[in-house]
Image (cartoon, rainbow, N blue to C red):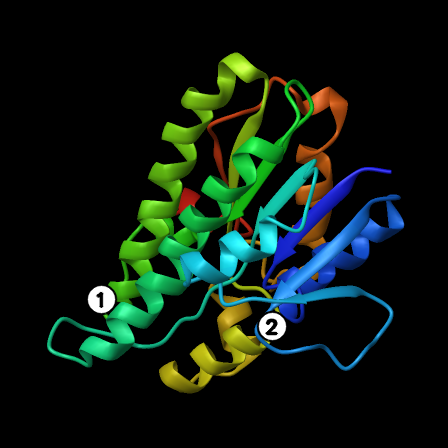
Amino acid sequence: MKHAVVTGGTRGIGAAIVQRLRADGYRVTSVGRNRPASGDVHFAACDVSSATDVNALFATMDRVDVLVNCAGIAGSNRLDGDDALWHGIINSNLHGTYHCCKAALPLLPDETGRIVNIASVLGLRGVPDQTAYCAAKHAVVGLTRALALSLAPRGITVNALCPGWVDTDMAAMRYRELGITPAQAAAGVPSGRVASPAEIADATAWLLRPESRGITGHALPIDGGGLALP
């Protein structure tokens, strides 16, 4: 049975990915800071922003077929804002992805190993009050592309998914920051709807299929056509 490690797997998109991969027959380790309410998922406590925590976690594993980096935090942030929030967002989203990729590399099998990084459409464009989050997610996209080239000789694929609005607690926080409703957010999407976490899980599962072995180094928007707007 193939082993998948999903960081940020206790809520939102990460939790949906955990459930999808379990349904697809993977043995899944869900990684997070806090144990989920449901006890039917194999859970490992870890702060991905800590290299010590991450290295200790992966030292307990003998094989990782799939690594999905979904852990991350967000928050309204400008350069004249809180330095602690800036560092927290960078550490969780970027450094956490780096630590996990680095620790997983010796455990990933050649030809069939897969890494999927959950970035964001804000890794492909800018938003003025999301300075830290945009910086972190742009860096995750760059890391994805560089690592894909590095691991191509081993046949390991590395891709990023870049969701737009998704029905999660993080989106709800952003609605409050902007003073808008979910319906107003959906009205700004060309498709007229907010994605579900299951849709991001479906895209993740697609990238893990044997038929997707030629797809690497890509940052795929899942935003209902938002980036196609002029």
Q: Quadrant of the N terminus?
A: top right
For the point 40% across and 71% down, which residue is it? 74
Q: Which residue is mark 2?
A: 168
Q: Amino acid at mark 1?
A: Pro
Residue 96 is left or right of residue 172, and the answer is left
Q: Amino acid at mark 2?
A: Thr
Q: Position of residue 2 (x, y in %)?
A: 80, 37
Q: Is residue 163 above or below residue 76?
A: above
Name the residue furthest top: 153
Q: Position of residue 152 (x, y in %)?
A: 50, 17
Residue 206 is left or right of residue 180, and the answer is right
Residue placed most toward the observer, 113 or 131: 113
For the point 55% across and 16% down, which residue is it? 154
**Which structural element holds mark 1?**
loop
Name the residue furthest left: 80
Q: Position of residue 188 (x, y in %)?
A: 46, 64
Give the Cα separation between the discs numbered 1 and 2.
22 Å
Q: Is residue 5 above or below residue 113?
A: below
